[in-house]
Image (spheres, coloured by chain):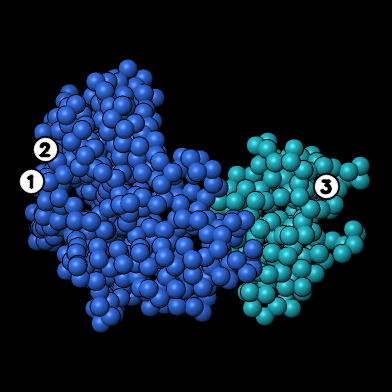
Amino acid sequence: MMPTLAAPDLKAVRADFPALHQEVYGHPLVYLDNAASGLKPQVVADRVQHYYALEHSNVHRGVHYLSQQATDAYEGARRTIQTFINAASVQEVIYTKGTTDAINLVASSYGRDNVKAGDEVIISYLEHHANIVPWQMLCDATGATLRVIPITDEGELDYDAFQRLLNERTKIVAVNHISNTLGTINPVERIIADAHSMGVPVLLDGAQAIPHLKIDVQALDVDFYCFSGHKMFGPTGIGILYGKQELLDAMPPYQGGGDMIDVVTFEKTTFNELPHKFEAGTPHIAGGIGLGTAADYINEVGHETIAAQEHYLLQYGTERLESIDGLRIIGTARDKTSVLSFVLDGIHPYDAGTILDRLGIAVRTGHHCTQPIMQRYGLPGTIRASMAFYNTASDIDALVDGLGRVKQMLG
Amino acid sequence: MTITSTIAERSAEIVEEFALFDDWFGRYEHLIEQGRDLPEIEDEYKTEDYRIRGCQSQVWMRAEDSADGTVHYKADSDALITRGLVALMIRVLDQQPADAIVSAELDFLDDIGMNEHLSSTRKNGLHAMIKQMKRYALALTN
């Protein structure tokens, strides 16, 4: 049995997040929108504030003390992230604006070099628009074809269909590690092994996995892994692209500008080494530093504790929601993270979300940037409650009570 | 409400009505009631041509002009709270002179504590609907 957060520990963890201790419309905030973005522990806010107040200067080019300090902090955070995901080398850790930016980088740079007319790219029905549109754009530009792995009614990938889709024309498989809308944890080890057996690289959209699971990119043997800082309790506007060095080395730069160059003349420019080759312009220095602090914070709480607490919340939440008449949970995969997407008979998700908001309960309603999933289930949208390790059983109870009020007003 | 009352008069009437409730719960129940009472738009108008794009809830709307220079609106939504807001907009703007609609200040939503629904982040189609109502009226005045 893994350790769950006993009451005193939970209280201590909650004390780390100032946002949890405020009222919304006169009710204590119940934050159940963690799949959209995680709240920030005080240490992250403090670290970013300290950087801006005292350490800020441009990185990588100054001869002076402050610039050296900023560079040390920024590059130190990169090493923290390297350890956090167990990358073999720090050169494999590219700072991006976020998951979306990381996927676009791979679709543009790797895609431009490796995908031609007649080739195929495999994604799945579970993807966030961020892992659909960049590949669609690549296919439109190259004449390649987008292949989509269907899902079962439970919201799991149809694995046999994936195996049938994989063929000698496949140039890359890009799927999410965890579905943001349904919470399904995909069998990524198996996907990677099967794709590799055909010589096909795999990109994982790890935006939803990074705040929940311990990620070891070497154990996964994944080729590209993308995630965002803000989902893992770090700053917005910063994210990571992990890529295997031999792949990144062979890829052309994504954007041109300062920091990514070696020698520039009007005739020819040679490019900087990894990871800087993919980091044009003055980066989000504060974001990188704050991200490192967020990774340290997660390590401090502990992945096992996080997993156990969220597993408990998922079980308790599923049980309580299932007891509500007319409520249907969408996404009932066997392997799931702490996401509860659901619909209420005869009640529009927007209406439900509006009433819950008035009760201080933050959920997400709508299509969650996954319109194909909604089309698959024939729904205008769902209500999604997504939990983090700082959520409690009483947050779930507040949601259930709130849904009672919703039904009373709108049913 | 009489046909001859102005946009300002109708808005004031709505503000007065909502002032009878002293909490959000009562105001929302009243809004939802207005939504339930709004006549449904005919199915033939629940199509892409009449749809106003919102991210979360859909609004369908059509407008007709009368010989006397007023505009007659019909609209509907798939979400009940949005429907209530649609009903209020119709109460205020239906059968008003086109030029009055174009220049109408619709801050009564603020006064009844529903302004949050006009925020672009709510994506309920209401903001786009008001724009569209004004656009119809503008087309008539030209």
For this rendering, which residue is in front, A81 or A319? A319
Are the residues at dot 2 and dot 1 in contact (C-beta closer than 8 Å)?
Answer: yes
Label 1 element class = loop
Q: Which residue is under mark 3? A: B71
Q: Are marks 2 and 3 on the same chain?
A: no
Closer to us: mark 2 or mark 3? 2
Q: What residue is rendered at 25% in x and 78% in y?
A: A6
| Letter of the chain that mark 2 sits on in the rendering | A
| Letter of the chain that mark 3 sits on in the rendering | B
Q: Is residue A171 visible in this depiction of the protein?
A: yes
| CA distance for labels 2 and 1 | 9 Å
Q: Residue furthest bottom?
A: A8
Which of the 4 image quarters holds residue B103? bottom right
Query: Color of chain A here?
Result: blue
| Disc 1 residue type (three-letter) | Ala
Q: Which chain is cyan?
A: B
Q: What residue is rendered at 40% in x and 76% in y?
A: A394
Q: Which residue is under mark 2? A: A245
Indicate which disc, 2 or 1, sits on the residue closer to the N terminus. Answer: 1
Q: Is residue A224 visible in this depiction of the protein?
A: no
Residue B76, position in %: x, y? 71, 50
Image quadrant holding the N terminus of chain A, namely bottom left
Residue B60, position in %: x, y? 69, 45
| CA distance for labels 1 and 3 | 68 Å
Q: Which residue is under mark 1? A: A88
| Letter of the chain that mark 1 sits on in the rendering | A
Are the residues at dot 2 and dot 3 in contact (C-beta closer than 8 Å)?
Answer: no
| CA distance for labels 2 and 3 | 65 Å
Q: What residue is rendered at 77% in x and 43% in y?
A: B42
